[in-house]
Image (cartoon, rainbow, N blue to C red):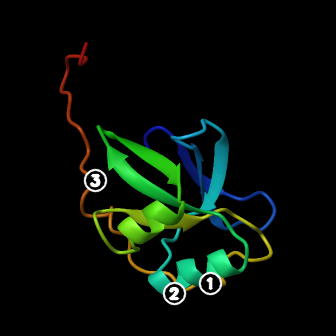
Amino acid sequence: MSGGNSNRCPTCRRTVVNLADADTGLPVVADRKPLSKLGEALALVGGCDTFELRWVAGRFELAGRDQFRIRGTPPGSNRVDILVRHDCELAGQWPTMKSQLRDYVAPVEYGDKPPY
């Protein structure tokens, strides 16, 4: 991933995403599989934080979800993946869906010359 790392949790070995929150700048470790609508609802009822993962200007951007983002951008819409903050004990328990970013993110070709 550009602008972050997709690797494995050292404790439970699940695939996680390491990025800074676009709003706060604080580091976030989130499960890589996107949540479905039901998955996000269950995660929120269970007290877990959720985040929007977007492809913006050639990089991934992660932003925390509040009541406005949850209502305005439900899972499965607007080329956004909804991720949950990683918790080894809860990882893999929430219903997931296919990534909305997989077919949208294209590699940037610069050729032999640097872009600057």
- Compare residues 101 and 68 and report the one nearer the observer: 68
Q: Secondary structure at mark 3?
A: loop
Q: Is residue 78 above or below residue 38?
A: above
Counting residues from the start of the chain, the first of labels 3 and 2 encountered is: 2
Instruction: Give the residue type that dot 2 points to.
Output: Leu
Which residue sits furthest front?
68
Q: Which residue is mark 3?
A: 105
Which residue shows up at 67% across the image and 68% down it?
14
Q: If you read the primary sequence from the N terminus, does the residue marked by circle 1 or circle 3 appear first?
A: 1
Q: What amino acid is at disc 3?
A: Val
Pointers 1 and 2 in contact (CB under 8 A)?
A: yes
Q: Is residue 19 visible?
A: yes
User: Where does residue 74 sit, x and y in percent of width and height?
Assistant: 39, 73
Residue drawn at the location 20% of the way across and 21% of the way down: 112
Few, some or many residues within 10 Å of mark 3 (<14, 14–19, 20+): some
Instruction: Name the residue carrying label 2.
Output: 38
Q: Which amino acid, by three-letter code, is at mark 1? A: Leu
Q: What whole-number distance in Å separates the C-alpha atoms at marks 1 and 2?
A: 6 Å
The residue that mark 1 highlights is: 42
The residue sitting at 31% across, 71% down in the picture is: 77
The location of residue 78, given as percent across then percent down, is 28, 64
| Residue 88 image-quadrant placement | bottom right
Which residue shows up at 41% across the image and 46% down it? Answer: 60
